[in-house]
Image (cartoon, grey):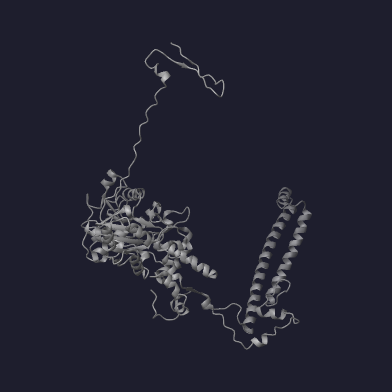
């Protein structure tokens, strides 16, 4: 939240951080022997985090953190694709960026394969055709079975991994923070998770996700960044190119805050003193040289001399090029004329036809013109070399300087009678630096507010706290007390200052009088999902039949959509395939059923045309063979 002790004028600048390529690590010996250590991949829609689940202290943090994007031109080879931190600046390649996600669900598995190649290569895995380490990967809450089936097929068939485990990022973060707080298992609580593409309400009852009552809100960090970009582009139409999406994400992460009371905070911004104290001025890069400013006579003369020299060089270059072209044409025409003098008439007439000429006299006239043009061109070059600085007015247009326009004014034009009076008034100087500043005021709180009021951006859906109220209403009062006693906030979009206080205030308004609740913020909202997955992998080693792990045999027997449940996973709902009902053959008409008993009888049916529209008749003639 904004504080009152900050200076009156706060000027910031964009960092415009350039990403550096990730190093290719060597495969650590501790991750190979005595058993292969699992690889933990937090497959986030904004950022991918990957590392080893090993007990050593050097593996306590993810080794790779990069944006979940790939830049690949149309028709480019796989080797030409740039992944994550290989792209130093996203803005020039914004139109080429592709992600494996649609909302928060993986749908583009070609990009997902490129991301996994990048992860395995930079972690030091050089084995051809297979990855001999178990894989623990996060997935979306209530992930569709088809998406899990495609991911399992990619991991087992393409990389031939021995074991795979899937879990929900918000549940892993919940699991990790409960371990740090030494809470007794199984835990009951409700998770408010907000990421890059969407937000989730995840109730956890007795240590397991209640998927039936989980809800999703399609508003999160990407919508807030787009909203901030729209607001500032409307406010500063002269700086559209400088207001990029990457810079808006930087503003959102470093300068926004969640208001405890949105309308009361907006009223504070009406006060000029509060505005001057709390507004963040973002300085854009600019050049301090003012075009058309006061220029001395010496500088004006130097500029004119530079323009004249530049025009002289351009004219000389053009004359040399024209002289060279005329000389080449003249040499060609003279060579054709020599064919006539040597008596080679066939070649001479053939050359004339190529030049679209009719006779030798026409050729001679062209030769005379070209000889004259070549001589004049050489003379002009000699004159320009001998008299530098002298320009022909007919060829060169003299530039008009800013101060020369004063002489063109009409002397009969009436002078302004107020000019003498205003001559003594000091005119305010134009501040170029202030013109290139973005004043970020109420935008600091309006963008995070869309999480609670999606209607600000035109989304026709409930906000986060209204959805929470809807979810809580589906439980008994005793269950509601247990859930709100452990409200857990996680996700990168929950890192705004004041978010915890805002949720506490909203819960105070939602809950009955004198009821108790507790709101807890994740230690590292953006990274705790990876740390929780690492803790779970260390406590549950991969083995055949182990809880939470899917072996290759399970994949082949139970299908790609199979999920081995654990405390941080989704609920596995098997796919129900409707069996086709066999179609019974239609029974023959009653008139023909009498014929089925006789084996030696045959029937010939002849349908006659209807005599009228009102009645239909058919003649049936039966004959015995």
Seen as rendered, the residue at the extreme top is 625
Image height of 560 relative to 449, above or below: above
- Please give the name of the residue rendered at 20% of the width and 57% of the height, measured from the top-left corner: 34
- Please give the name of the residue rendered at 41% of the width and 60% of the height, measured from the top-left corner: 219
- Total label count? 0
Residue 168 on image: x %, y % = 31, 57
Image height of 399 relative to 549, above or below: below
Seen as rendered, the residue at the extreme right is 361
Q: Is residue 271 left or right of residue 339?
A: left
Q: Is residue 245 left or right of residue 517?
A: right
In the image, 158 versus 342, the foreground residue is 158
The reply to whether residue 51 is visible in this rendering is no
Residue 115 on image: x %, y % = 37, 56
The quarter holding residue 577 reads top left
Q: Quadrant of the N terminus?
A: bottom left
In the image, 168 versus 436, the foreground residue is 168
Residue 502 on image: x %, y % = 36, 68
Image height of 618 relative to 34, above or below: above
- Please give the name of the residue rendered at 44% of the width and 75% of the height, measured from the top-left corner: 268
């Amino acid at each position: 939240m904004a504080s009152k002790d900050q200076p009156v004028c706060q000027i910031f600048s964009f960092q415009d951080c350039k990403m550096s390529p990730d190093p290719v690590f060597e495969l650590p010996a501790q991750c190979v022997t005595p058993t292969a250590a699992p690889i933990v991949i937090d497959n986030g829609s904004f950022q991918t985090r990957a590392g080893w689940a090993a007990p050593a202290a050097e593996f306590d943090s993810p080794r790779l953190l990069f944006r979940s994007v790939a830049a690949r031109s149309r028709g480019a080879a796989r080797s030409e694709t740039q992944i994550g931190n290989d792209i130093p600046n996203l803005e020039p390649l914004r139109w080429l960026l592709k992600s494996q996600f649609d909302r928060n669900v993986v749908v583009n598995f070609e990009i997902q394969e490129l991301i996994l190649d990048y992860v395995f290569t930079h972690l030091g895995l050089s084995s051809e055709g297979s990855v001999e380490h178990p894989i623990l990967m996060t997935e979306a809450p209530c992930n569709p079975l088809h998406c899990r089936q495609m991911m399992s097929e990619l991991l087992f068939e393409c990389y031939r991994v021995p074991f795979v485990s899937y879990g929900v990022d918000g549940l892993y973060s919940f699991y990790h923070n409960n371990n740090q707080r030494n809470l007794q298992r199984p835990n009951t609580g409700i998770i408010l998770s907000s990421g890059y593409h969407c937000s989730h309400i995840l109730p956890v009852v007795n240590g397991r996700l209640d998927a039936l009552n989980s809800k999703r809100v399609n508003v999160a960090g990407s919508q807030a960044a787009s909203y901030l970009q729209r607001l500032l582009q409307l406010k500063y139409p002269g700086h559209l190119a400088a207001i990029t999406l990457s810079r808006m994400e930087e503003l959102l992460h470093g300068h926004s805050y969640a208001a405890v009371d949105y309308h009361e905070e907006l009223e504070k911004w009406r006060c000029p003193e509060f505005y001057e104290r709390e507004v963040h001025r973002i300085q854009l890069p600019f050049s301090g040289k003012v075009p058309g400013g006061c220029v001395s006579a010496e500088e004006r003369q130097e500029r004119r001399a530079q323009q004249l020299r530049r025009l002289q060089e351009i004219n000389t270059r053009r004359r040399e090029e024209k002289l060279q072209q005329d000389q080449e044409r003249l040499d060609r025409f003279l060579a054709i004329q020599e064919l006539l003098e040597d008596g080679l008439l066939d070649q001479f007439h053939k050359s004339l036809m190529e030049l679209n000429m009719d006779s030798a006299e026409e050729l001679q006239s062209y030769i005379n013109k070209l000889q004259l043009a070549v001589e004049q061109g050489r003379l002009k070059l000699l004159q320009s070399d001998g008299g530098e600085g002298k320009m022909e007015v007919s060829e060169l247009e003299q530039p008009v300087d800013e101060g020369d326009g004063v002489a063109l004014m009409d002397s009969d034009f009436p002078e302004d009678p107020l000019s003498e009076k205003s001559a003594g008034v000091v005119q305010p100087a134009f501040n170029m630096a202030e013109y290139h500043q973005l004043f970020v005021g109420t935008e600091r709180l309006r963008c995070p507010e869309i999480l609670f009021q999606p209607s600000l951006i035109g989304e026709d859906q409930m906000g986060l706290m209204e959805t929470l109220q809807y979810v809580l209403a589906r439980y008994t009062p005793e269950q509601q007390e247990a859930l709100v006693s452990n409200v857990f906030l996680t996700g990168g979009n929950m890192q705004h200052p004041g978010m915890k206080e805002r949720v506490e205030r909203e819960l105070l308004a939602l809950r009955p009088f004198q009821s108790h609740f507790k709101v807890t913020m994740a230690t590292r909202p953006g990274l705790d999902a990876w740390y929780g997955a690492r803790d779970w992998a260390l406590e549950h080693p991969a083995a055949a039949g182990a809880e939470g792990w899917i072996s290759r045999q399970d994949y082949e027997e139970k299908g790609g959509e199979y999920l081995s449940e654990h405390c941080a996973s989704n609920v596995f709902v098997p796919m129900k395939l409707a069996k086709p009902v066999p179609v019974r053959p239609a029974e023959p008409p009653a008139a023909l059923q009498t014929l089925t008993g006789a084996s030696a009888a045959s029937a010939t049916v002849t349908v006659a045309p209807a005599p009228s529209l009102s009645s239909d008749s058919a003649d049936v003639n039966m004959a015995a063979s």
